[in-house]
């Protein structure tokens, strides 16, 4: 290694530098590494697009359209390059309305000032993310969405940040979410349930094929697009198979006594005693009360546990089939009107879920087909027996779905098509329940530096868009 | 044969012993394989658009390293200051001057020079007349087998014209690359050990700089004679396989010097 011709390498001493140098060292290390990872990925994708173009240029029926193909491709690439070199910041967008709210942030309908396009902009507060140790989850969501190119998953166009927040610019699904429709229609027929269940199966399958477990499948995260077809959103809890899981989080929640728990539902829900076992059709208004309280619950730090599989509460590990349990609970809710383990407070819901053998109950006054009950019982069961553990095809083959063509679902008419009057129609969102805050203040100058805030390096992402109309 | 390599090496008038960054053991990378694909212009993309993209990416990369020597420590000092680097230099043989408002060359401490360089480059990059960002203004490259659009030659045609870049755009980009090259050269000559080697960042620096040289030469943003203060490292990277034989950077290298450096380190 050392040769007299060269200056002898001194012993490495990182300790002689100050704190700022140590901090900048980490930044520098990560940025350089991130640059090459991104650059290699983009070059590979660019190469794939070029090969695709060349193949189409060769095809005889494209003979007269070759110039158009070429120039279109060149312009698409150029627009992407311009997108990459411009700074994304809040002031590039004008806010139309707040359409969603969660504990860690909010979702706003925005219009990009430059091209007039409409998007959903999700904002997550950095301080909350750090204090509640949510960073791996944010990262998981960004990774899952960035890697996905599925029609069943909401598209992530870009991520950016400023000193207070992370932003995710996403496809706007104007149909609202499944929870809102459930509140509106209270109960679905088996036909309508079959349609949504079949679409959710395809969506979960798409996520699993990417190597991700969603972990948080629930009606609030099932969005409806312009045609009323579903798209999965909110991958904040999604877990790549590669990463560690954290069940301690749930364990602590389980062990916490009800009175001191932060899990107590907000609002005046405490006064209404609702227990799923006692619920009947006659107290539908209470069910809706329960649903509205669940919407408030969605704004709290923990969210509702109603759809979570029992094995997620234990340290024994879990896998893709936890998402199928969640689907079972959603099918139950669509048909019955409330999820199977609905309770007064989350602790009781947790206890019911872990004792599902004794607490899963179908009310007598609701007529369900044998196939529907059988399907639900095959999904709300221990993971070793759960339908779907050997792939989505198991569920698709269940008699409940007899006659469903899973490959053409998105082309048939959805049972509920959002009646939209404009590209910023928010009539499917509970906007009146949400505080409509001021327009965002433009990020202060030097927004670039915030990107360098250590825990968030590498968060920024920009997707190649195949259509600019 | 090695005689001529030694002559060429001596002609560089390098300090003895040779600087640590010329030691092949420390000229390594965080990236493996041929990264020419990262700087090769996609066939359908108009040249000016690609150059603009590369300028911005390399500027971001360079500043990632400059930040380490440029930001204040808790005691208010920067690692690069007028005591450590009273001149903007790349070794004893190269020092760079900045033009003052009367267009006179002036010598400056490296820190001041970098400040002026940063202000000048970001002034250009952030100027949407120089670097347009409107999505609607984009164009595509000419392909004689496919596109029929008549292209002018001569003084009425320039790099980036069809995409809305001004006539002086390419010249400005060459100057930006020249300025960035000088800063890289200063980082190697003045700060390679203090602090990059000690902070375990020399492989990162090598990768970003070799990618910079590959891009600059492939797109004619730097001329061979402008590479001078870093020529021995370029020679070494041609000899150790960092620069593939089909690259312009390889073409500009003196392979024999690079091989001699490998030999001196016992790695040939």
Image: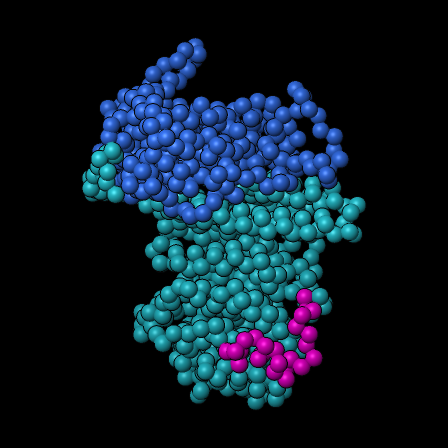
Q: Which chain is cyan?
A: A
User: Residue at the spot x=43%, y=79% of the render?
Assistant: A353
Q: Nearer the viewer, residue A166 or B97?
A: B97
Q: Nearer the viewer, residue A363 or A128?
A: A128
Q: Nearer the viewer, residue A48 or A122?
A: A48
Q: Is residue A397 magenta?
A: yes
Picture coordinates of residue A45 (x, y %)?
56, 50
Q: Left or right: B201 with respect to B168? A: left
User: Residue at the spot x=34%, y=31% of the render?
Assistant: B2
**Which coloring applies here?**
by chain
Picture coordinates of residue A183 (x, y %)?
58, 70
Asked if A395 appears above or below A56 in the picture, the reply is: below
User: Residue at the spot x=59%, y=41% of the render?
Assistant: B42
Asked if A66 appears above or below B137 in the picture, the reply is: below
Q: Left or right: B105 with respect to B129? A: left
**Region rendered in magenta:** A387-410
Q: Is residue A456 visible?
A: yes
In the figure, the shade used to draw chain B is blue
Picture coordinates of residue A442 (x, y %)?
49, 39
């Amino acid at each position: 290694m050392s040769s007299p011709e060269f200056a002898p390498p001194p012993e490495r001493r990182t300790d002689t530098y100050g704190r700022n140098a140590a901090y900048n060292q980490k930044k520098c290390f990560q940025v350089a590494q991130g640059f090459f990872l991104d650059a290699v990925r983009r070059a590979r994708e660019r190469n794939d697009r070029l090969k695709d173009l060349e193949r189409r240029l060769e095809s005889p029926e494209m003979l007269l359209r070759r110039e158009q193909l070429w120039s279109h491709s060149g312009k698409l690439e150029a627009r992407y390059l311009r997108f990459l070199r411009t700074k994304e910041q809040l002031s590039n967008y004008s806010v139309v309305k707040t359409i969603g709210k969660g504990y860690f942030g909010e979702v706003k309908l925005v219009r990009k000032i430059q091209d007039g396009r409409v998007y959903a902009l999700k904002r997550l507060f950095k301080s909350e993310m750090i204090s509640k140790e949510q960073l791996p989850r944010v990262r998981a969501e960004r990774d899952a969405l960035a890697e996905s190119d599925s029609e069943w998953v909401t598209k992530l166009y870009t991520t950016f940040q400023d000193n207070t927040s992370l932003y995710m610019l996403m496809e706007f699904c104007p149909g609202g979410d499944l929870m809102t429709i459930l509140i509106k229609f209270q109960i679905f027929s088996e036909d309508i349930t079959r349609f949504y269940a079949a679409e959710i199966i395809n969506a979960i399958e798409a996520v699993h094929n990417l190597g991700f477990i969603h972990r948080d499948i629930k009606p609030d995260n099932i969005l409806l697009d312009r045609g009323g077809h579903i798209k999965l959103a909110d991958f904040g809890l999604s877990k790549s198979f590669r990463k560690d899981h954290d069940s301690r989080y749930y364990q602590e929640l389980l062990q916490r006594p009800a009175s001191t728990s932060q899990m107590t539902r907000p609002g005046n829900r405490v006064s209404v005693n609702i227990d799923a076992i006692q619920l009947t059709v006659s107290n539908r208004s209470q069910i809706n009360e329960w649903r509205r309280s669940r919407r408030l619950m969605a704004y709290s730090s923990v969210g509702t546990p109603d759809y979570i599989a029992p094995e997620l509460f234990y340290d024994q590990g879990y896998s893709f089939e936890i998402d199928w349990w969640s689907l079972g609970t959603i099918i139950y809710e669509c048909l019955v009107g409330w999820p199977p383990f609905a309770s007064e407070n989350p602790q009781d819901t947790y206890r019911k879920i872990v004792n599902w053998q004794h607490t899963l109950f179908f009310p007598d006054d609701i007529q369900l087909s044998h196939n529907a009950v059988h399907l639900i019982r095959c999904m709300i069961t221990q993971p070793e027996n759960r339908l779907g553990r050997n792939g989505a095809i198991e569920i698709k083959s269940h008699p409940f779905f007899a006659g469903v063509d899973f490959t053409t679902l998105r082309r048939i008419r959805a049972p509920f098509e959002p009646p939209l009057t404009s590209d910023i129609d928010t009539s499917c969102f509970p906007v009146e329940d949400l505080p409509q805050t001021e327009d965002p203040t433009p990020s202060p100058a030097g927004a670039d530096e915030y990107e360098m805030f250590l825990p968030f390096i590498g968060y920024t992402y920009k997707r190649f868009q195949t259509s600019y109309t | 044969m090695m005689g001529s390599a030694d002559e060429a090496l001596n002609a560089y008038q390098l300090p003895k012993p040779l600087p640590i960054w010329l030691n092949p053991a420390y000229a390594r990378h965080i990236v493996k394989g041929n990264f020419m694909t990262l700087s090769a212009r996609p066939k359908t993309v108009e040249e000016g658009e690609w150059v603009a993209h590369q300028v911005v990416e390399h500027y971001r990369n360079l500043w990632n390293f400059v930040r380490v020597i440029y930001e204040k420590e808790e005691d208010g000092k920067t690692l690069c200051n007028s005591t450590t680097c009273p001149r903007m230099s790349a070794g004893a043989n190269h020092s760079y001057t900045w033009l003052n408002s009367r267009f006179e060359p002036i010598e400056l401490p490296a820190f001041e020079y970098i400040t002026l360089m940063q202000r000048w480059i970001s002034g250009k990059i952030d100027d949407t007349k120089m670097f347009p960002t409107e999505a609607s203004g984009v164009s595509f490259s000419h392909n004689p087998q496919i596109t029929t659009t008549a292209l002018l030659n001569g003084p009425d045609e320039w790099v980036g014209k069809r995409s809305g870049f001004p006539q002086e755009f390419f010249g400005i980009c060459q100057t930006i690359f020249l300025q960035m090259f000088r800063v890289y050269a200063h980082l190697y000559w003045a700060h390679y050990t203090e602090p990059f080697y000690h902070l375990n960042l020399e492989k990162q620096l090598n990768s970003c700089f070799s990618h910079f040289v590959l891009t600059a030469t492939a797109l004619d943003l730097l001329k061979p004679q402008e590479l001078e203060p870093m020529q021995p490292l370029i020679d070494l990277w041609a000899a150790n396989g960092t620069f593939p034989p089909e690259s312009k950077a390889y073409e500009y290298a003196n392979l024999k010097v690079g091989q001699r450096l490998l030999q001196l380190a016992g790695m040939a």
